[in-house]
Image (spheres, rainbow, N blue to C red):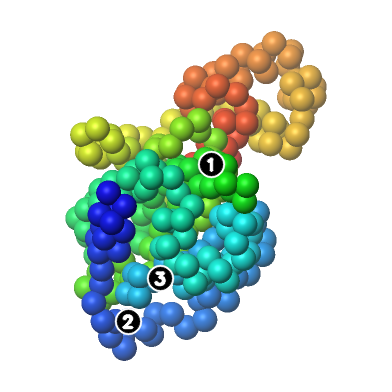
Amino acid sequence: MTNHLHSSLFTKNKVGKIVAEDHLQQQDYLEAIKAFARLTYESMYVIDYEKMAFEYVSDNPLFLSGYSAEEVLNLGYGFYFKNVPEKDLALLNLINEAGFDFFAKLPGKEKKQYSISYDFHLLNQEGKPMLINHKLTPLFLTSEEKMWKAMCVVSISHHQQAGNICIYKQGTEDFWELDIQSKIWRKSEKPKLSKREIEILRLHAQGLTINQIADRIFVAPDTVKYYRRRIFERLGVSNMVEALSFAVNSKMI
């Protein structure tokens, strides 16, 4: 099982030799990524599919499982095989297969407008599994329009279990969810919130209590509670922490 997972993860998006014209895309892009990594709590890294290796790993500790950034960089894909439980390795293999099949069918340069998000368990420094959210988007395509390099961002998941596999298209409300059983992508639209609901989410993000929000927008606390319930229903979550995480990840606030 493990050998099959290793083989599939390495070969699904195997690209050939990168020509000189493709290399011209890069310039000093890693400096911009490093600058962004300094500004966020999230972990960031870059995958090079030509070399099947990591090109950059930020020193944000969430993704490192107790290793240094340099150690994870040197481990490359081996980091997954050491620190992801076997069940979730199988899930990553499915995501890899289905994700690149979806990507291959997209037209030309439009491929750069898409990103994929999913959750899986990663062992922390104490060897205990924690559920993380992993996002990936293309950085560079080859002249054959294959994904050459990808940027990845890792954060704590707001879900309760692994999976939650979605592909988003930049600038649209469209997204696709992967049905794990049928391995079929199903198109949906992001849930829509009213202006008042977005306002209440933003005030919660600032740390205000229900009573403080009620005072700020001149309504009764029970009215704020009513809007909170509507937010939870529309986003399919059960508390404000999950609602805020969903809204931030979906770029709703």
Q: Quadrant for residue 196, please give it.
A: top right
In the structure shown, which secondary structural element does the residue marked by tag 2 occupy? helix
In the picture, measured across the screen, residue 49 lies left or right of residue 57, that is: left
Closer to us: 7 or 190:
7
- How far apart in space, not on screen, are marks 3 and 2 (Cα)? 18 Å
Residue that carries the numbered disc 1 in the rendered image: 129
In the structure shown, which secondary structural element does the residue marked by tag 3 occupy? strand
Residue that appears at 50% across and 76% down: 29
- How far apart in space, not on screen, are marks 1 and 2 (Cα)? 39 Å
Q: Quadrant of the C terminus?
A: top right
Relative image position of residue 40 (x, y in whole percent)? 64, 57
Relative image position of residue 246 (x, y in whole percent)? 53, 36
Residue that appears at 48% across and 43% down: 121
Closer to us: 140 or 12:
12
Using a 10 Å C-alpha cutoff, classify the residue at mark 3 as few (fewer than 14 neighbours), some (14 to 19) or many (20 or more). some
Q: Specify the amino acid type for callout 3.
A: Ala
- What numbered label is drawn on residue 22? 2
Q: Is residue 90 above or below residue 7?
A: above
Residue that appears at 22% across and 53% down: 101
Residue that carries the numbered disc 3 in the rendered image: 53
In the structure shown, which secondary structural element does the residue marked by tag 1 occupy? strand
Relative image position of residue 159 (x, y in whole percent)? 50, 33
In the picture, measured across the screen, residue 183 lies left or right of residue 238, that is: left
Relative image position of residue 8 (x, y in whole percent)? 26, 57
Q: Quadrant for residue 202, please give it.
A: top right
